[in-house]
């Protein structure tokens, strides 16, 4: 991911947190509470003496420039009218000397006052519990949770609908092709992930993964992602006039980038959406990618054993959850025909991004990583197979037909 070096979590004293907060507010810090689960880096709920509460995020592993890009992208949603369904960045207070003013022009949201210079920023605080926990504890609320997630994503997607790469650059918004995001799908297109896989020293595992699975799926991913560029960009990027002369491309907007249930807060008594949280993967990109990423991340379940004790697929889609996700989404944004036609291929390619990430993470040595692959247990090394099997499942003709039927049903409900 662009701008990201490493992940580390540290603890900061009340005095250190108060010092960073002084760049955002004159209110006095009363209490700081470290947050865990669903958050990355070091995160604190901060309660102030004026009755307000925020989240202070110290972005271990990111450059200040990249952290600012995250905040600018999220802030654009607020300026576009999307401010109820996600946490949003708070700008720093006006500075009053030349050096500070120059720094503030470059970093409107990011503070570098942390003792080691680690970038930090302040976010609005929202109440709620993680959606995955609520669905586990209250299965009766699972459909309501997924409808809420679908609606929140749709409203995010339409807030900046039609944004172009030129606009994103002008507005200092993160663009998926150049700045990371959308599961770093551009690294797949550019062959960077393939190069990493080729460095796997377990030649048998590497060759089986490449020759029986990855190479075929990568070709499909590259073909599908051609739809995510404009005609002009398509000719320049892919040199494929036959594709680009069709003059069709997927709609772009602001994507959450990691819309899994642990990055969503809901009200535990009703399952209704509170907010989409964790802005670190926000980017401008094809919104179909975001919706499909949510589907593959939130709607799979363990397959029940067959009568003979065997299972064809270890995990299957919970069609009721997928139906609820689509229903919630389509209540706010109708899915265009091109997105319905390519919904299943995009489910597979979003899975491929996550599957290959696991393969590389646990099977390919990284000189910048403290851990050698020998340190990982076999369960971790083989965790990519779970997602590989999901992709294979999504090629089953019966499954494909079931998903198409759900998409058609939503189309009919929005036109009636």
Image (spheres, grey):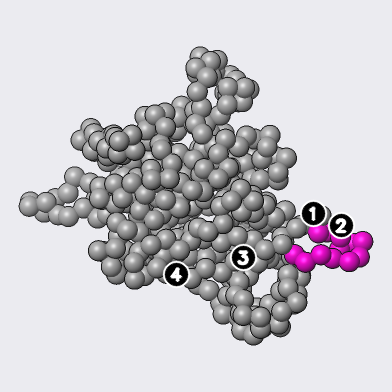
What residue sits right under mark 3 in the picture?
123
**In terms of depth relative to the viewer, which is nearer, 76 or 180?**
76
| Magenta segment boundaries in residue numbering | 92-104
Circle 3 Cα neighbour tier, 10 Å, few/some/many (<14 / 14–19 / ≥20):
many
Q: Tell me what residue is drawn at x 46 percent, y 27 percent.
A: 223
Residue 317: x %, y % from top left: 27, 48
Query: Which of the 4 image quadrants contains residue 342?
Result: top left
Q: Tell me what residue is drawn at x 24 percent, y 55 percent.
A: 302
What residue sits right under mark 2 in the picture?
102
Instruction: Compute the Cα span from label 4 to label 1.
Output: 33 Å
* Callouts 1 and 2 close, C-beta under 8 Å: yes
Disc 4, SS: loop
What residue sits right under mark 4 in the picture?
128
Q: Earlier in the sequence, mark 4 or mark 1?
A: 1
Q: Tell me what residue is drawn at x 70 percent, y 43 percent.
A: 171
**In terms of depth relative to the viewer, which is nearer, 377 or 64?**
64
What residue sits right under mark 1 in the picture?
106
Q: Is residue 51 left or right of residue 373?
A: right
Residue 155: x %, y % from top left: 49, 48
Instruction: Compute the Cα span from label 2 to label 3.
Output: 23 Å
């Amino acid at each position: 991911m662009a701008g990201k070096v490493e992940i580390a979590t540290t603890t900061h004293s009340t005095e250190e947190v108060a010092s960073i907060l002084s760049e955002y507010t004159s209110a006095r810090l009363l209490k700081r509470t470290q947050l865990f689960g669903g958050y990355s880096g070091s995160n604190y709920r901060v309660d102030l003496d004026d009755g307000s509460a925020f989240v202070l995020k110290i972005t271990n592993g990111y450059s200040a420039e990249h952290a600012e890009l995250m905040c600018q992208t999220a802030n654009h949603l607020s300026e576009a009218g999307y401010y109820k369904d996600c946490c949003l960045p708070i700008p720093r207070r006006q500075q009053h000397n030349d050096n500070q003013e120059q720094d503030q022009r470059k970093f409107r949201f990011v503070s570098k006052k942390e003792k080691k210079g680690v970038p930090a920023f302040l976010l609005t605080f929202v109440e709620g519990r993680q959606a995955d926990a609520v669905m586990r504890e209250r299965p009766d609320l699972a459909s309501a949770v997924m409808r809420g997630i679908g609606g929140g994503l749709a409203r995010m997607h339409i807030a900046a609908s039609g944004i172009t790469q030129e606009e994103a650059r002008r507005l200092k918004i993160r663009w998926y092709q150049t700045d990371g995001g959308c599961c770093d799908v551009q690294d797949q297109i550019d062959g960077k992930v393939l190069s990493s896989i080729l460095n796997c020293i377990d030649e048998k595992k590497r060759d089986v993964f490449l020759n029986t699975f990855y190479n075929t799926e990568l070709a499909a991913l590259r073909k599908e992602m051609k739809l995510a560029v404009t005609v002009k960009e398509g000719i320049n990027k892919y040199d494929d006039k036959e594709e680009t002369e069709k003059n069709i491309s997927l709609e772009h907007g602001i994507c959450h980038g990691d819309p899994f249930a642990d990055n969503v807060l809901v009200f535990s008594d009703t399952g209704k959406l509170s907010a989409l949280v964790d802005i670190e993967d926000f980017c401008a990109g094809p919104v179909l990618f975001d919706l499909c990423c949510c589907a593959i991340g939130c709607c799979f379940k363990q397959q029940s054993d067959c009568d003979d004790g065997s299972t064809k697929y270890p995990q299957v889609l919970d069609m009721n959850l997928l139906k609820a996700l689509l229903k919630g989404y389509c209540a706010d944004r109708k899915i265009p025909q091109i997105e319905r036609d390519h919904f299943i291929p995009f489910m597979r390619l979003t899975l491929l991004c996550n599957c290959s990430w696991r393969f590389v993470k646990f099977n390919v040595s990284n000189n910048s990583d403290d851990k050698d692959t020998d340190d990982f247990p076999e369960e971790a090394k083989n965790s990519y197979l779970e997602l590989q099997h999901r992709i294979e499942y999504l090629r089953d003709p019966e499954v494909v037909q079931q998903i198409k039927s759900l998409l058609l049903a939503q189309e009919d409900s929005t036109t009636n």
